[in-house]
Structure formats: C-alpha cells, structure tokens
Amino acid sequence: MGKLEGKVAVITGGSSGLALETAKRFVQEGAYVFITGRRQEQLDEAVKQIGRNVTGVRGDAANLDDLDRLFDTVKQEKGKIDILFASAGKGEAAVLGEITEEHFDKEFGLIVRGTLFTAQKALPLMNDGGSIIMTGSVASVKGFPGFGVYAASKAALRSFARTWLNELKGRNIRVNVLSPGQVDTPDSQRLDEETRKMFESLIPRGKMGRPEEIAAAALFLASDEASYVNGLDFAVDGGFSAI
C-alpha cells in the first residue's frame, strides 16, 4: 500500500517542473491528484505523463475565478481534499532602483495573493487532519541581488504557515513550507555554463538537486509520516542555505 493510498491531492502549477514531478510521485503512492496549469497544451501533456488518477484543470492561481472552477471540479469529482500543495510562482529579476509596480504586483499577486486564496478556497473541502504545503524558496533567507521582491514574497509564505497552523489547530490541519534550493530543471538547464557552475559551487555536494529529491520531501510532508511536523520551513537544498 502506498503512503498516500486513497488520498486526494490538489497541486497548483502541477503541469511542469517540481510540482509535476511531485504529482507523479503522489500518484505512485496511491493518491488521486488534481493539477493546474495556464497553458492547455502543457497541461494535457502533464496529464499524459502522469498517466492515471489525475484531472487537469486549466487555470491561473492568481485568478480567483479560475480557483473557483478548480475547486468546483474537485467538489464534483471527489468531494474532499486531503493534501493541498500550492506550488505556483517563479521569480524574475529586478534590482532596487529598477523595480516597477508591474513587477511587484506580478510577484506578490501570484505567490502571496494566489497562495492565500488557493488555501482559503480549498478550506471547505479540506479533511480534518489534512496537509497544506506551500512552495517557498531558500531565496527567502538569502540575499540574491535582483530577487528582493521574489524573496520577500516567499518569506510571506513562512508567515502564513505560522498563523494558519494556529488557526487550523482545531482541525489538526498541518501547514508547512517546502523551500527548494537550486534544482536541475529545464529552467536551470537554460542557464549559461558559468552561472550553473557558480550555483553548484555554493552547494556542499557540488551539484544541483534532482526534481525527484524535492518530490520525495513533498511526499514526506504530505504523508502521515510527518504527523508531528507542523509550521516547518523545510529547506531541501543540499545544505546551501545552512553555510
């Protein structure tokens, strides 16, 4: 029996990257997953890759109407949620002095606003004893030039976790943040060789993480094995943020 046998999981941004790898792992462990993505073609391909026990719902986590459609679909098909993995959002660079309102609104709109309303709209369907996971970033505790707005938006998720676990303690719903370091994904593979080597030099083992290593950490936080893990900012970065 898998670690998530009979569980229902919702993964936003699950049509690509680390969230897609996590969706695959959840299904392998017995869960039924709902994934979202903004582009239908990419979403259809992700559903095909996952292969079974999956529903794809096109939508943007920053769009509240899209979130309503997502959770209406979940309610109609399964009627419950055991695991919510809010994983939408990636950073774009802008240094202080060049930050625009558009840049700020885009980063905070998707990562902070989108995550907040994803969780809030999911809550009526969440089973007691469920697990909420948010994708943070080790950028939130570092000082990468150009990524101040992105880092601040990810730090806000850590604050959400602290508050929400207290607000939801009567329902025994756990809330954790999963913060990856640099991972070898299609996005990182587009970096030039010098930049990749720079990142790898900062990781004690000398190489980037693998998507399946992040998925394994997400599985732990989603499963009953993490029943005593609540309010954690779980850095999965090979020790990068610790040194």
Image (cartoon, rainbow, N blue to C red):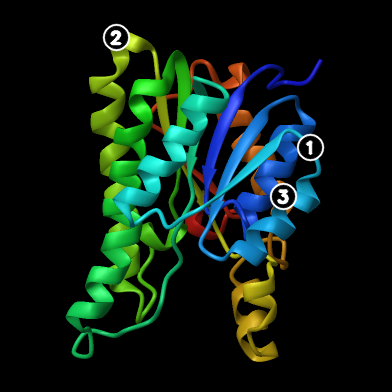
Label 1 vs label 3: CA separation?
A: 8 Å
Residue 108's place in the image compared with 77, above or below, is below
Q: Quadrant of residue 139?
A: bottom left
Say whether marks 2 and 3 touch (CB < 8 Å).
no
**Residue 128 coordinates in the image, percent (x, y):** 42, 12
Q: Residues within 10 Å of mark 2 (few under 14, many from 20)?
A: few
Question: Which residue lies at the image location 42% right of the left edge and 58% below the top edge?
Answer: 60
Where is mark 3, residue-wise? Answer: 47
- Residue type at mark 3? Val
The dot on residue 170 is 2
Q: Position of residue 198 (x, y in %)?
A: 61, 81
Residue type marked 1? Arg
Q: Is tag 1's residue or tag 2's residue first in the polypeptide sequence?
A: 1
Rendered image quadrant of residue 109: bottom left
Residue 233 visible: no
Q: Is residue 135 above or below residue 217?
A: below
> Which of pointers 2 and 3 lies earlier in the amino acid sequence?
3
Q: Nearer the viewer, residue 139 or 171?
A: 171
Say the numbered circle drawn on residue 52: 1
Q: Nearer the viewer, residue 36 or 223?
A: 36
- Residues under labels 1 and 2: Cα distance? 34 Å
Of tags 1 and 2, the one toward the viewer is 1
